[in-house]
Image (spheres, rainbow, N blue to C red):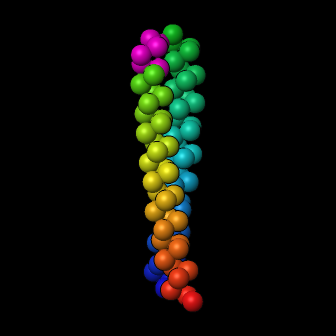
Amino acid sequence: MPEQDAQIARKGRMAALVIAGTGGLWILATILGGALALDQRLRALFDMMALGGFVFALVLIYQLWRLRRGHQGSRR
């Protein structure tokens, strides 16, 4: 069981880092895009990349949820 607890914690940290990193980079790209007057197509590319990062975070959260459900079921 301690190995599974460590796996749950590791997956949770990874999801948190992906969300924080994606959000920070997205804000930075938005600020730089406005300051450098980048083309709207390039700004949209940054938005799509951020969307991909957030979708990946949702996948990680779903995996974490499934892992925790299986972990709780084994304790009963």
What is the quadrant of the C terminus in the image?
A: bottom right
In the depicted structure, whether residue 39 falls above or below residue 11: above
Query: Is residue 63 visible in the rendered structure shown here?
Result: yes
Query: Is residue 14 visible in the rendered structure shown here?
Result: no
x, y percentage for residue 50? 48, 35
In the depicted structure, whether residue 14 falls above or below residue 23: below
Report the front residue among 20 and 69: 69
What residue is rendered at 46% in x and 14% in y?
40
x, y percentage for residue 7? 46, 72
What residue is rendered at 52% in x and 35% in y?
25
What residue is rendered at 45% in x and 80% in y?
3
Report the front residue among 30 and 57: 57
Q: Does the magenta stretch include residue 46?
A: no
In the depicted structure, whether residue 50 falls above or below residue 75: above
x, y percentage for residue 5? 52, 77
The range drawn in magenta is 38-43
In the depicted structure, whether residue 32 falls above or below residue 54: above
Image label count: 0
What residue is rendered at 48% in x and 68% in y?
66
x, y percentage for residue 45? 41, 25
Per the picture, the main secondary structure of the magenta-coloured stretch is: helix
Q: Does the magenta stretch include residue 41?
A: yes
